[in-house]
């Protein structure tokens, strides 16, 4: 049985309003179709034209060289610099004095930087790195809170051609150490601490533990943020404010080859050590620039907020590189969404008149749980476009987002992509695509996506299978740092000639792609392969449920039995009646086959720090096994103990 059976049916669909369509950057179905066709039939003409929209130090000679597949070479012969693409290009225009970054700290402090100010800050930062001996090609680890200097750190590395490797500020000392060692980093940029839920995260302490005994790290540059006491290693450690005090605010950008590495970003798969995903300069910038402009439909007066942390790829591509290359005003927020109250996000939207908001399904489900009253007391009329990323969004959460946050007027772009893809791959175009709730809809320009069976044969409409991508695209990963063979094995061996992202999907009769979750999470019940995501969506469509995670546990009779962990809304009580009602609800929504054997109530579900549900851990709990996996990336360790107690 090579297919994944699709049981979710969704008849609703929402087209953009005429008002939105009329102003949109891509505003007709014909224009979208024409561009898509050209991007597939003649990718070099299409991407060559987009590539020429960036400012080059030396123009490129060739658009694509795929002769060394699966390592693509895009825009060869060209030279450019990512920090100049994001900053310098705007200084010759009236954007010079436009706000580039408007930042708010968790305690409520604010700072903002125009493009001219941001460029001067980045040059000072880059000069300070040069003075410490950081050179082109060196790897620099960045372990910081969400403060403006984090964005500047990326751009300062880019300005001198150093390769940044950002490690999310919630990772443990051991995780940071592994990444510093794997990348061979010689410098670390950090802060004394960062604010999270009213407490100081002592980042410098973690860096000290992570770097102990690593002789190759010659510099640790520390931004002062929380003013907590920090230990100091003389000669190695340097305060950022001291290092930039006399640094010049000018520095010519290093001319980088198109295929020079811009950054590494580690991603942990379900097994094995984290992979240092390698992105290069030109293709990545072209991809993030075009997707930001067309999918977020950016206009000069937009105030754009992506709520991700820069420690994830979403923050790299859609806080820093994409939006700044487009000359946008970007809002950046340091803290937690419920600090000091559960309406903090909506207060920020009201205060900064945010017009484009990009967030994650896991956050949306948390807001649903906290209650509408925390949303409706703020004025959200500035919003015009909403986005989601990171996980499949179940239709009920999508509808809530549309209604309660978007006031029924904002299109929603559900964007599917990965650390590896660098930029958005599947998404509605907000001015043209009629979008069913929970659907990432169509491939972006240049993305030749299809759904295949286990043998790599293309499947027909509504047959669930494996998502695959046939052609190279500019922002694709160029490899795994230090492990070329793993790059080929992981992504290019399952289906020869095709990129395999590891997600299940189906394409409906209208050509829309529905992501069905990671193929590792697929259940096998009585010989039927079912997607966890669809059963979870059915559970969440019951009014008592706000979040659900479905996993398999071994069963003598059916092979695998369906075990659902369910978080219910405030005001709801766990009871045997509710368990029966939920099982019955799944049966009626999608059929008896998908009826869970067990329903377990959980106060919270185990999630990675980027918000993805860790179904692997739930599988162990469901089977009452010892937890075999590394739990160091878990957001809240206590959740495991509580789940254990609740299910024993
Ligand atoms: O399973 C898909 C899911 O997140 C994976 C990529 O994770 P990461 O590299 O951490 O990047 C997250 C941000 C781009 C994918 O393989 N995923 C991401 N976006 C969606 C999604 N699943 C369904 N719908 C999405 N919109």
Image (cartoon, rainbow, N blue to C red):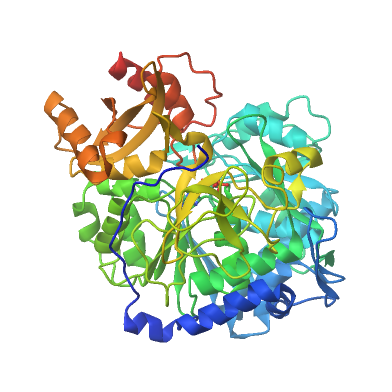
In the image, residue 406 sits, relative to residue 25, either above or below, namely: above
Q: Is residue 41 above or below residue 13?
A: below
Q: Report the number of discs.
A: 0
Pick the quarter of the image with the C terminus: top left
Residue 17 visible in the shown view: yes
390 or 379, which lies in front? 390
Q: Nearer the viewer, residue 474 or 120?
A: 474
- Say whether residue 384 is left or right of residue 442: left
Q: Position of residue 600 (x, y in %)?
A: 28, 25
User: As drawn, is 93 to the left or to the right of 130?
Assistant: left
Q: Nearer the viewer, residue 570 or 1?
A: 1
Q: Is residue 549 above or below residue 48?
A: above
List x then y, in percent, for residue 103. Answer: 49, 60
Q: Residue at x 66, y 58 (%)?
A: 470
Residue at image location 60% in from the left, 51% down from the top? 457
Instruction: Give residue 257's quadrant in the image.
Output: bottom right
Left or right position of 430 against 310: left
Q: Position of residue 361 (x, y in %)?
A: 39, 50
Q: Is residue 348 above or below residue 233?
A: below
Q: Which x, y percent locates residue 286? A: 68, 69
Q: Is residue 110 left or right of residue 480?
A: left
Q: Is residue 389 visible?
A: no
């Amino acid at each position: 049985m090579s297919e994944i059976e699709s049981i979710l049916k969704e008849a609703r669909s929402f087209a953009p309003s005429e008002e939105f369509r009329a102003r949109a950057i891509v505003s007709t179905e014909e224009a979208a179709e024409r561009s898509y066709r050209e991007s597939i039939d003649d990718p070099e003409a299409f991407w060559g034209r987009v590539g020429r929209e960036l400012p080059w130090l030396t123009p490129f000679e060739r658009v694509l060289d795929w002769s060394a597949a699966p390592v693509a070479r895009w825009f060869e012969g060209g030279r450019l610099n990512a920090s100049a693409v994001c900053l310098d290009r705007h200084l010759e225009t009236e954007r010079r004095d436009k706000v580039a970054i408007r930042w708010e700290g968790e305690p409520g402090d604010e700072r903002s930087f125009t493009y001219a100010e941001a460029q001067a800050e980045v040059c000072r930062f880059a000069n300070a790195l040069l003075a410490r001996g950081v050179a082109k090609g060196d790897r620099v680890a960045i372990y910081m809170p969400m403060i403006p200097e984090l964005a500047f750190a990326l751009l300062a590395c880019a300005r001198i051609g150093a390769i940044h490797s950002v490690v999310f500020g919630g990772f443990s000392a051991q995780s940071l150490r592994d990444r510093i060692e794997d990348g061979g980093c010689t410098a670390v940029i950090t802060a004394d601490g960062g604010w999270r839920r009213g407490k100081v995260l002592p980042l410098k302490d973690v860096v000290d533990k992570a770097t102990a005994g690593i002789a190759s790290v010659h510099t640790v540059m520390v931004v002062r943020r929380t003013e907590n006491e920090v230990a100091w290693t003389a000669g190695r450690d340097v305060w950022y404010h001291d290092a930039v005090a006399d640094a010049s605010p000018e520095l010519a950008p290093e001319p980088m080859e198109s295929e020079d590495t811009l950054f590494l970003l580690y991603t942990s798969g379900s097994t094995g050590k984290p992979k240092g995903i390698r992105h290069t300069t030109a293709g990545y910038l072209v991809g993030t620039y075009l997707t930001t402009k067309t999918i977020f439909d950016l206009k000069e007066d937009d105030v754009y907020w992506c709520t991700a942390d820069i420690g994830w790829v979403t923050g790299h591509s859609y806080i820093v590189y994409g939006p700044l290359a487009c000359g946008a005003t970007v809002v950046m927020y340091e803290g937690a969404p419920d600090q000091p109250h559960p309406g903090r996000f909506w207060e920020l939207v009201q205060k900064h008149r945010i017009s484009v908001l990009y967030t994650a399904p896991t956050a949306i489900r948390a807001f649903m749980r906290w209650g509408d009253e925390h949303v409706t007391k703020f004025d959200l009329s500035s919003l015009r476009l909403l986005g989601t990323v990171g996980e499949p969004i179940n239709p009920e959460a999508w509808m809530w987002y549309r209604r309660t946050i978007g006031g029924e007027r904002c299109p929603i772009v559900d964007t599917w992509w990965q650390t590896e893809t660098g930029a958005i791959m599947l998404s509605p175009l907000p001015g043209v695509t009629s979008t069913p709730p929970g659907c990432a809809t169509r491939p972006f320009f240049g993305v030749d996506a299809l759904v295949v069976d286990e043998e790599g044969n293309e499947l027909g409409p509504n047959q669930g299978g494996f998502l695959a991508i046939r052609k190279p695209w500019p922002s694709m990963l160029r490899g795994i740092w230090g492990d070329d063979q793993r790059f080929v094995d992981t992504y290019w061996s399952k289906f020869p000639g095709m990129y395999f992202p590891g997600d299940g999907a189906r394409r409906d009769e209208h050509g829309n792609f529905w992501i069905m979750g990671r193929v590792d999470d697929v259940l096998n019940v009585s010989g039927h392969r079912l997607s966890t995501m669809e059963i979870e969506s059915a559970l969440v469509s019951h009014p008592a449920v706000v979040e659900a995670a479905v996993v398999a546990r071994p069963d003598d009779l059916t092979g695998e039995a369906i075990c659902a962990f369910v978080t219910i809304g405030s005001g709801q009580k766990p009871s045997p009646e509710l368990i029966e009602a939920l099982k019955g609800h799944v049966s009626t929504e999608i059929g008896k086959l998908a009826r869970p054997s067990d329903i377990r109530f959980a106060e919270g579900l185990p999630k990675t720090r980027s918000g993805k549900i860790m179904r692997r851990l739930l599988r162990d709990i469901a089977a009452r096994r010892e937890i075999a996996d590394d739990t160091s990336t878990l957001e809240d360790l206590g959740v495991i103990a509580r789940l254990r107690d609740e299910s024993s």
